[in-house]
Image (cartoon, coloured by chain):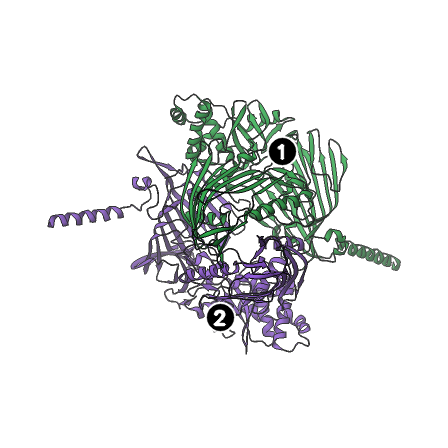
Amino acid sequence: MQIFKIKVLIVFSLLMSQLQAQKKEYLFSQIPDSLKENADAVVRLNQIDINIVSQRSMNIKSQRVITVFNEKGLSAIDAFENYDKKISIKNIEARILDVFGNEIKKIKRKDFKDVSAISGSTLFSDARYIYLDYTPTQYPFTVVFDSEIESSNTAFIPSWYPFKNYFVGTELSVLTVNVSGNLGFKKKEINFNGFNIEKNTDTSTQLKYTAKFILAQKQEPYCAPTMVFPRLLMSLDSFNLEGKDGNAKSWKEFGKWYYDEILDGTVQLTPETEAKIKNLVGTETDVIKKAKIVYDYVQKKSRYVSVQVGIGGWKPMLAADVDRLGYGDCKALTNYTRALLELVGVPSYNTILYGDSYKRNIQSDFVSIQGNHMILAIPYKNDYVWLECTSQDDPFGYQGKFTDDRTVLIIKPTGGEIVHTKIYEDKGNLQKSKGTYLLDEKGSLSGNISIVSEGSQYSNKARLEHVHPDEKEAHYKEYWSNINNLKLGKIVFTNDKDKVTFLEDVSINAANYANISGNKLLFSINVYNQQGNAIKRIRNRKYPFEIQRGYLDTDEINIVLPKGYEIEFLPDNFDLKTKFGEYKTEIVKTEDGSLIYKRFLLVNKGVYTNMEYDEYRLFIEQISRNDNAKIILTKT
Amino acid sequence: MKSEILISIIILFLCTYSMKAQDFRLGKVSIEELKEKVHPKDSSAVAAVLFEKGVSNLIYNQTSGFEIELVVKARIKIYKKEGYEWANKAVRYYLENSLREKVVFSDVATYNLVNGKIEKTKLKSDGEFDEVINKYWGQKKIALPNVKEGSVIEYEYALHTPSIGNPRDWYFQSDIPVNYSEYVTLVPEYFIFNTNVKGFIRPTINVVKNTKSIRIDSKERVTNGFGGAVSTNFTSDNINYTETRTTYLAENMPAIKEEVFVNNIKNYTTSLEQELSMTQFPNSMPKMYSTNWDAVVETIYKYDDFGPELNKTGYFEDDLNQILKGVTTLEEKIAAIFTFAKTKVKWNGYYGYSCEEGVRKAYKNGAGNVADINLMLTAMLRYSDLNANPVLLSTRSNGISFFPNRTAFNYVIAAVETDKGLILLDATEKYAVPNILPLRDLNWFGRLIRKNGTSENVNLMPEINSREFVSVISAIDSEGVINGKVKQYHVNHEALKFRQKHLLTNKDNYLESLESRNSNIEIDDYERENELDLSKPVIENYSFRDNKTSEVINGKIYMSPMAFFAVKENPFKQEVREYPVDFGYPIQEKYTISLKIPEGYEVESMPKSMTVDGGEKIGFFRFVIANNNGQIQIVSTSDIYSSIVTPEYYATLKDFFQKSIEKQNEKIVLKKI
């Protein structure tokens, strides 16, 4: 009996010590120093296990363990899950560990915050999320976050990011995928090169990746994370979207499914509307002219209101409802425009893409649901005319900077097709300035200028037409921040939507523009278009950089000098040609004693290596310096 | 002749009449309203409120008792596409059971002019949405149908709330023009409200008293005799009372607009806030809530999650005794306790003068809201025999409290009264030091409450200068390149700001942005002193190479005396100013620069020394320059005396900045000997 007792005691104490040993986990001291470098937090483990049970059911378990060093690292915790009618959260909980790996707090589901996910331009949606709201009491600390969700939307397998944040090191990131049955699972690796990512398993039903030891990344200008961060796209040939089964191995099949299942039956309109639109178009037969009439009608009638409920998040509102309510989101307004065009015999196609001023392509070699925006394509002369239906102001067919130059998916009744939207050439993104200024004996300036903007520069300017006068004034005071004491005179705009050109006529004056020192006047000759000096020096740049859109600025300015002064010094003509573009300035003396200042700046679009960044910085710096070149006048 | 005058009077009368003849009943939209292309007084307006009428009725509900029914009717004109957002409306309501509110929209419609005729489109249920924002708040939203440029929209909503203590604020003014805004309160004699009107434009007030009656049904169970049958008696009483009907009316309110350096635009928007100050029911003693600052403060002091929390000390005594071992002087004591409080309990980001967790629990968990932390701090200071008290205040985001009410405050800090004056402490901010409060606290006056319940105003605006002190030793070469060394001190609030903004920033990134902010000079040998020694200024040391700010033209060197430190743009660009300019705290910026010119060069010309006196409301700028045999010495000092500059001094302020900036950008010209 006695012996037995002792045995029990020993077993018990063994158990205890084991338990205690287990309790200490993720010690701060175990993080390698190199991972701490430049890091506000380190992801100790990011384990994602995706289990696709059937075409209509997917289970995702995640465990994230993050050691946070300071306040800036809090955003790396990412302890939240989205949910709605199709996604349910089975489990969500967190534990907080101190620097020595002792548990100091446990947070249960009910202590997470449950909030609506409506934000920005969305008026209503049934999307919600649950998130961890924890106030750290000490740094560093570690969060162990566990969650499990179930979703029937197998059309969306979340992409895998071995790491997501800047200034966060990653110790271990693991993805496993299990697929039951033959659902046609596929994947695509993007930007994997150069990172320590290992593929452990890769069969038609099982997949495993391990990413280890990824150092904290610094953010660098002119480089978006999508350009360089690794990610894995995943998708099924046989999927389910909001209760609708789909099957697509090609874009053609995908488009056909989308057309038949989602778009079909959404374009009926009332006979009154039909009569109205036919009456508006009248006897017009030209496709473009008819489309212009319809587009103008939609622009005047509708506004952008986004409501995303259930499949409404993917299926456009009925055209008849848009007609009655006068609003809708991008899908609804695009589809409505298509319905109206159809009534007057103009075929058009809904087009899925990523809408963003940062150009982003649909991954054309990976058939899956992608994109975040919809526009309309009208086939015309072996090409397409593109309509942005959410805008009440855009000129017909203009793509500005939100949808230009990118790979998109067109949905035709016969199926999907991958095409590329309109490319605005560097030289077509034009700003042409022509003006004059006059300097008086006291160095004060008065002048006027006309600025014509085209191509992508049009969209920078056209918005000025509708802004509040105060904002307009603020724009010019910023644009001409080089002119101290700037006072704006008359401002006249001419917005030619047919030619897509925007003309600004502005008159200005500025007291004491020129510096007076002794009997001399000193001033920058380039008053109206100075290159801002905004290119940072980056220590040890790692990533390539991209100039997404090129442009061309030309200036021709007539300068009338004050009486009683003669020119002591004129800057030399300047000519610079690099791979990044061309820059040229020239000063011509005219017979009547005035000067003509000519400036030409062409910046090329392109992707350049990290090594070329300093050259680019120098290019801009030289321009900036020369833009600031001074004239010196001496009193006679 | 006479008849002509008469006719013109009649015409005049008719004109005024027809101008006034707008019909403020829902559904009575006029063709004139629909035809209007721009707002008659503000052509830039994207939309305008044609009228908005709110009736706040304090009523008796047989089942739930007194409640407020707020009914709002509005008509809004949409002039431009940019005003379409005004065709979406959202009203928030409280969700938690005991104080649950209810919002019902009705009579929602859009009116358009179609071929000269008025076309009305009603809102159907598919245009109405109900969102549960979080555990506490929901919101009803509507999106009006068929909205175009020129449309007029109308809606009505009713909000029922059991929270009669704090009726919702009424905003007469908006960021679009408001032609007519009327707010009516109906209050039975049993309730007295404090009312405060904010903003530059005052509404007119009209008070009428009416006699009303409430029927109160009650039932009583009566037992007839010993062991007898039980019956229920129903009684119904009619009670007469006086109801006060107050009408606030404001007309032709211009759109409110945002400006830079504004503390909180809400302070200047014409609005009305109310708070229950007293109740007196028949046959009972009056109950005071808040009538003056003392009463407000007393009420707050008595709240369970305020005053009593100050008396708890047991939870920290042992720890604090350890901390205070060997600490003797008053200053040391305060510093030690303040540091202890800051490290012991971390702020969870929530405001409030009421404890969320309670001091004891917050102490144990190491996290709490503003009150948890600063009431705990006050208790610790008191425990250590210091004359410490809490100070209630309203943060900048909460606006300024002009009249006594409990919601005027949303925050609490601690104060110690000493021989040398008051020392203010806010332990929610980890980089704060005694008397340097975070910017959110700097909002005019706070209210200090003593143990005996008395209270007094405390000025929160800092009177001591915060300083940026820069010392530069540099030399320019014949190419126009300046090399030098900088020592820069950030003192008081500037130190706090620097620590908050930059301590956690990656060093390389900080330097990259420091370089790009300073004309892209190149910075090396960068070092910081006193990063975490909060009692001392933050000091930055670095060497620089500046080949950007000077020019060699025709063999002469043109340079700004302040090099890359010169401020190039006036922050005040607006021509006129509507609201006070708020700097937060008085500040001095001082640069001491020594510059050696290259061998073989001499000064051809240089700016003259100068002072700009902005007056006592603004500040003083002094620029002193001297040349001692090729060694140029510059001392440039700019003082901003006060935290707030009122609009009447705006022109002077703008000019003050302009003159000092022009001086900084004048050129030194160097030529070869």
Left or right? Give the position of A37 relative to A468: right
- Provide the letter of the chain coloured purple: B
Rendering coords of residue A470 (x, y %): 43, 49
- Provide the letter of the chain coloured green: A
Q: Quarter of the image for the N terminus of chain A: give it.
A: bottom right
Q: Can the viewer see residue A104?
A: yes
Q: Amino acid at mark 2?
A: Val
Q: Can the viewer see residue B94?
A: no
Q: Amino acid at mark 1?
A: Ala
Left or right? Give the position of A231 relative to B72: right
**Residue at image mark 2:** B458
Rendering coords of residue A326 (x, y %): 43, 35
Q: CA distance from mark 1 to mark 2?
A: 62 Å
Disc 2 crowd, CA 10 A, few/some/many (<14, 14-19, 20+) = some
Q: Secondary structure at mark 1?
A: loop
**Residue at image mark 1:** A155
